[in-house]
Image: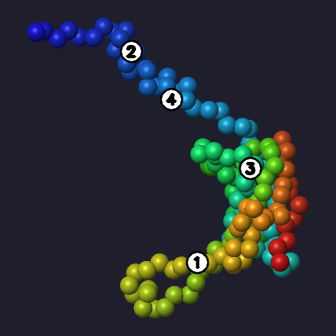
Amino acid sequence: MQIRPLPWTLRRVIVLLPALCCISCSHRSAPLNSVHGQLFYKNQPLAGAVLVFHPPEVNVKTIYPTGVTEADGTFWVRTGDQDGAPAGDYVVTVTCPQEVPIKSKMVSMGQKPESIDLFRGAYANKAASNLRFEIKKGDNELAPINLN
């Protein structure tokens, strides 16, 4: 029994078929809009806080817009590796990880320092959050957020 080589056109289809499937399966994400603001805790700028913007509808492919505050409390929102967030209504949660002092014995054992939320989870629950923002098309400067 002799094996014949595949015709050229069939070889092209076999090579291009996976690429065509990837293109057809990929979805175009909504355009992103610039979002920035400032976060305060007890009227002082807060550094290192993580803000997560929860859209009303989510699925397994949802990428949550997030921001991390700088030393002056300012933050810029990113979605995945891109600046901005899709237009829409969001509930925002905030956590601020703080390192827990570790005992010297733990350090000698090679354990990494643990962290706790500065707010003890008070602003981490989406259902209980009163931080709600509408992101509009274009540039969005959010009202200052002051947590107590």
Upstream in sequence: badge 4 or badge 1: 4
Which percent across, then down, holds residue 33? Answer: 78, 44
Quarter assignment of residue 120: bottom right
Q: Which residue is more in the foreground, 17 or 68?
A: 17
Q: Residue at x 83, y 58 (%)?
A: 132
Q: Work out whether residue 148 can be spotted.
A: yes
Q: Residue at x 44, y 25 (%)?
A: 18
Where disc 4 sits, the SS reads helix
Give me the C-alpha separation between circle 4 and circle 3.
Answer: 26 Å
Which percent across, then down, holds residue 81? Answer: 62, 49
Which percent across, then down, holds residue 108? Answer: 39, 87
Give me the C-alpha separation between circle 3 and circle 1.
Answer: 27 Å
Query: Disc 2 marks which residue?
Result: 12
Query: Disc 4 marks which residue?
Result: 22
Query: Disc 3 marks which residue?
Result: 55
Upstream in sequence: badge 2 or badge 4: 2
The amino acid type, in three-letter code, at marker 3 is Pro
Give me the C-alpha separation between circle 1 and circle 2.
Answer: 54 Å
Upstream in sequence: badge 2 or badge 3: 2
Q: Work out whether residue 71 can be spotted.
A: no
Upstream in sequence: badge 3 or badge 1: 3
Which percent across, then down, holds residue 144? Answer: 87, 65
Determine whether 142 is above or below 17 in the image: below
Q: Quadrant of the C terminus?
A: bottom right
Q: Residue at x 84, y 41 (%)?
A: 137
| Colour pattern | rainbow
Query: Disc 1 marks which residue?
Result: 115
